[in-house]
Image (cartoon, grey):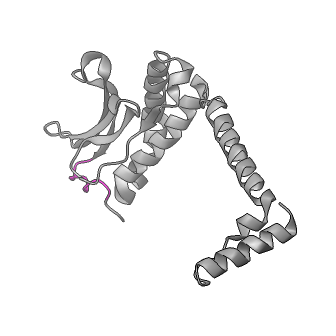
Amino acid sequence: MSHWFKKSVVVLISILTFGLVTPTHAFFNENNQLDKSQSKESSIHKEDTKELSPIVEQRISHEDFVQNMINEAEKNAYVKFGDKIKTVIEDEFQKVILPNIQAAIAQTALAFPEDDLSSLTISEVPKYAKSEKIFHIVDSRTQKDILRFHVRRDHPPLEGFYFNFHYHTYHDDFQTHHDLGSIYWDKNTPPQWMSAS
């Protein structure tokens, strides 16, 4: 539009509405409408490309998976033990029990394709001190347990106390105790789980 025509329209609208309504700046700027439509198109195009971009799933090798799980397993075990128990059984736990936990995790991992391993996670240590649970390996997609690692206090007559480490698997609906080993504590009753020194 020509410049004088725009000014005439503004004056005419102002006179007709007694100055209560004035045309917007968009009326004066033809490019403004063009800019808005272009920006809408570009934002729509950006959204389309976001939707079309392939989703890259995190892939993890069996070896990396087992190593990550064993690191988390060790941390969870020490949280479960607490300082009082950890200081006494830590060395034997690392030499005897941890390698057996690693073997159980590695064997189970072979049953899953590498694409599915990233959905397997370790549960948190329970707050309830008397529970046997150390940690569970859970499929985060279904929230179902795959492996359950437990420790219980055994007290055979006249022998003192032992910590019996074992696990259960989803293959038999968690019915069988798969032994990981036992660690002798003492003749005296061990402290509660998660006890600080």
Kindly indicate the quadrant of the structure image that contains residue 158.
Answer: top left
Residue 116 is left or right of residue 24, and the answer is left
Residue 93 drawn at (x, y percent): 43, 40
Residue 57 is left or right of residue 46, and the answer is left
**In percent of the image, x 86 and y 68: which residue is there?**
3
Residue 61 is left or right of residue 152, and the answer is right
Residue 77 lies, with reference to residue 97, above or below; the image says below
Kindly indicate the quadrant of the structure image that contains residue 133.
Answer: top left
Q: Is residue 61 magenta?
A: no
Residue 18 lies, with reference to residue 143, above or below; the image says below
**In percent of the image, x 79 and y 69: which residue is there?**
6
Name the quadrant of the N terminus.
bottom right
**In percent of the image, x 66 and y 42: which residue is there?**
44
Residue 190 drawn at (x, y percent): 25, 52
Residue 20 lies, with reference to residue 96, above or below; the image says below
Camera-nearest residue between 183 and 65: 65
Camera-nearest residue between 137 and 131: 137
Q: How many marks?
A: 0
Camera-nearest residue between 159 and 52: 52
Residue 173 lies, with reference to residue 56, above or below; the image says above
Camera-nearest residue between 85 and 127: 127
**In percent of the image, x 62 and y 84: which residue is there?**
19
Kindly indicate the quadrant of the structure image that contains residue 120.
Answer: top left
Q: Main secondary structure of the magenta part?
A: loop
Name the quadrant of the C terminus.
bottom left
Report the residue that reaches farthest toward the left: 157
Residue 123 drawn at (x, y percent): 38, 42
Residue 11 drawn at (x, y percent): 72, 78
Write the start and end of the magenta stretch as one range.
Answer: 186-194
Q: Is residue 189 magenta?
A: yes
